[in-house]
Image (tube, coloured by chain):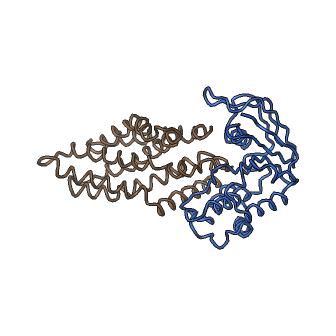
Chain colours: A blue, B brown
Amino acid sequence: MLTTRRLGKRYGERRVLRGIDLALPRGGFLVVTGPNGSGKTTLLRICAGLAQPSEGTIEREAARAQVGYLGHDPLVYRELTALENLELYGRLYRLPERRERIGMLLERFGLWDVRHQRVASYSRGMTQRLALCRVLLHEPDLLVLDEPYNALDEAGAELLDAQLAELRGERTFLLATHDPARVAPLASAALALAT
Amino acid sequence: MSYVRDVGALARKDLLLELRARDTLPAMLLFVAAVFVVFHFALPGEPSRLETTGLLWVAILFTALLGLGRAFVPEREQRTLDGLVLAPCDRSAIWLAKSLATLAFLAAAEVVALPLYGLFFHRIEGATVLAVVLADLGICAVGTFLGAMAVATRARDLLLPLLFLPLAIPIVVGAVGASVAASPGKYLGFLALYDLLFVVVCWATFEYVVAE
C-alpha cells in the first residue's frame, strides 16, 4: 500500500527527515513514535500527499480520494456547524449516500445532538471527534492519523479504540502517537524516529 | 458537471462563512462609502468627470483589495486548506469558488458605491457599468490567485498589494479609458482580453500554488 525509499525532507538548510525506508502492506498498522521535532508530522504529511519529499521516493497505492488525514488541526471551519462541515466534505468527496453516512458518524461519535451548533462553540475534544468523523467520512483505504488521541477524554478515546479495532485489517493505518502502548495491540509494525 | 458542483459547494461555504462572521463585506462597504464622502468634501469646487472617474477606480481597486486580503483568512486561521487540497476535486475549483465569492462581495459593495458616486459626483454611464463588470472579473481572478500565494507567507499583508497592484494597472487603464472615452469599445475589449488571459492562466496554474 505504501512504500518509501531513502525518504528525506529539508526545509531550507534544516533537515527534518533522512533515509526513511518503509514498506506498509495493505491492511497493515504502522505506529510511528519519536520525540518532538523528530519528523513524525512531516513523514505523515508526505505519506498523505500533503507535502513532497526533498529526497528519496514514495509509492502510494491509494489515490488522493482514498486517503484520510488527521493532522494537528481538525481541518473544519469554526463558523460552520458540524453538519455543514461534513456536508461540504461529503460533497467534495462525492459520497452517494452522504446524509446517511454523516448521520451514522455523528451518532457514533456522540455529536448528533449538537450537529446544528457552530464548531466555534465546541470544546477541543468535541472538535477532535468531529475531525475523526471528517477523516472516516469517505471510508478511506489509507488512514494517516497524527496524534488522534489528542484532546479526547476517556470516553472519546475508547470510541476511537473501538473504531480502530473495527477497521483494523480492512484499512491501512499510519498512526503517530506519544502513547504507543494504547495502540500496541493493533500495531503490525513500529517505526521510532529520533531527532 | 461534478466540477460545477464542487465550485458551488465551495462558494456556498465561503458565502456562509461571511454571512456568519461578517468580516469582509461590512469593511468593504464602510471603506468605499467613506472614500466618496471624504472626497466629496475634500475636492474643491466642482471636480471634473475625468478627476472623479480616477477617484472611482481607485476606490473600487482598494475596496477589492480589502476583500482579497481576507479571502483566505478562514483557511489560514483554521488551517483548512489541507482538507480542501486532499479532497479529490480539481484544485482549481478552490480558486474559482473563492473568486466567485469575492466577486459577490465586491459586486455588493458596488451596488452601494456606484449610486453614492452618482449622488456625490457625476452620473454613471452605461460604459462605466460595463467596465465595472469586466474589471471585477479580472480583479477577483488575479487577486484571489495572488491571495492564495500570499497567505502562505508571513508578510502576506504586504505581499498581496505588492503583487496585485502592478498586475491591476492594465485594469485601471482599461477601466478609466472605457469610462471617459467617446468610443469605449476598444477599452472594453482590452478588459475582456485581460480577463480571458488571466482567468485561463490562474485556472491552469492554481494547482502549483497550493502544493507544498
Residue at 70 percent across and 51 percent down: it is A70
In the orientation shown, which residue stands out farthest toward the left? Answer: B45
Question: Seen in the image, is B22 located left or right of residue B4?
Answer: left
Query: Residue A4: x, y in percent?
Result: 80, 34
Question: Seen in the image, is A162 located left or right of residue B71?
Answer: right
Question: Seen in the image, is A137 located left or right of residue A186?
Answer: left
- Nearest the eye: B28 or A158: A158
In the orientation shown, which residue stands out farthest toward the top? Answer: A13
- Nearest the eye: B57 or B208: B208
Instruction: Locate residue A50: give its quadrant.
Output: top right
Compared with residue B48, is residue B107 higher up or lower down, i.e. above or below?
Answer: below
Query: Residue A180: x, y in percent?
Result: 80, 49
- Nearest the eye: A136 or B146: A136
Residue at 86 percent across and 53 percent down: it is A186
Q: How many marks?
A: 0
Query: Residue A94: x, y in percent?
Result: 70, 57
In the orientation shown, which residue stands out farthest toward the bottom? Answer: A113
Question: Seen in the image, is A45 located left or right of residue A158?
Answer: left
Give the position of the C terminus of chain B as an image quadrant. top right
Query: Residue A142: x, y in percent?
Result: 79, 49
Give the position of the N terminus of chain B as an image quadrant. bottom right
Instruction: Locate residue A40: give its quadrant.
Output: top right
Residue at 43 percent across and 57 percent down: it is B23
